[in-house]
Amino acid sequence: METVFTPFQSLGGGMLIGFAAVLLMAFLGRIMGATGILAGLIQPDSGSEFAWRAALVAGMVTGPLAVLWVTGSMPAVQVPLSVAMLIIGGFLVGIGVTYGSGCTSGHGVCGLARLSPRSAVAVVTFMLTTGVTVFVVRHVLGG
């Protein structure tokens, strides 16, 4: 498995996420945590809550179409895992999001910007867990 280094695309994507987080906070006073936004879309408090959440999720889902429009080709995505592994991974992420009181976008982008100690601990935990997981999958399991 090869990891492709894409600094410019990653920087551009990060800037867009940061800009969206700033706009959401500036105009609606909301923190842009993707799992919280999705959860609020599934069980909205009001119609106005549903509208902005649906617009944000639609933007996330249609992102590849923006790449197609800009570059002329869809982004290449390879997932070298079985459907069962994806389901298990999604379940584990859901547990982590629940116990961590948020996801990487909520803690990493917005929480760190607000100097939240809880978010700093969460981000360090995300990064350490990711590093250990990559090591185990690539070097212990041979993936």
Image (tube, rainbow, N blue to C red):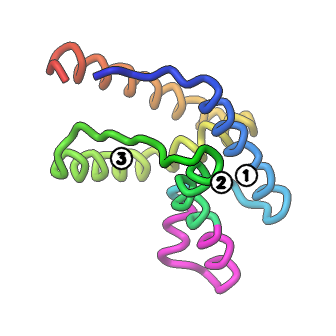
Magenta region:
37-55
The residue beneath circle 2 is 32
Instruction: Please name the residue shown 72% across and 60% down the image.
Output: 30
Amino acid under disc 2: Met
Left of 28 or right of it: where is 96?
left
Residue 8 vs 35, above or below: the answer is above
Q: Amino acid at mark 3?
A: Val
The local secondary structure at tag 3 comes to: helix
Residue 56 sits above or below residue 118 on the image: below
State the image coordinates of residue 122 (x, y, percent, origin top left).
52, 34
| The residue positioned farthest toward the top in the image shown | 139
Check disc 1 and give the amino acid type: Ala
> Is residue 124 left or right of 70 when viewed as pictured?
left
Which element type, helix, strand or loop, lies under badge 1? helix
**Residue 67 drawn in magenta:** no
* Residue drawn 56% across the image and 79% down it: 44
User: Do the residues bearing badges 2 and 3 touch, measured as CB atoms within 8 Å?
Assistant: no
* Residue with the mark numbered 1: 20
The main secondary structure of the magenta stretch is helix
Q: Is residue 140 left or right of residue 64?
A: left
Position of the N terminus by quadrant: top left
Which sits in the foreground, 21 or 1?
1
| Label 1, label 3: how far apart the Cα atoms are | 23 Å
Q: Residues within 10 Å of mark 1 (few under 14, many from 20)?
A: some
Pointer 1 with pointer 2, Cβ within 8 A: yes
Q: Percent x, y for residue 80?
A: 24, 37
Q: Which residue is mark 3?
A: 93
Q: Are marks 1 and 3 in contact (CB under 8 Å)?
A: no
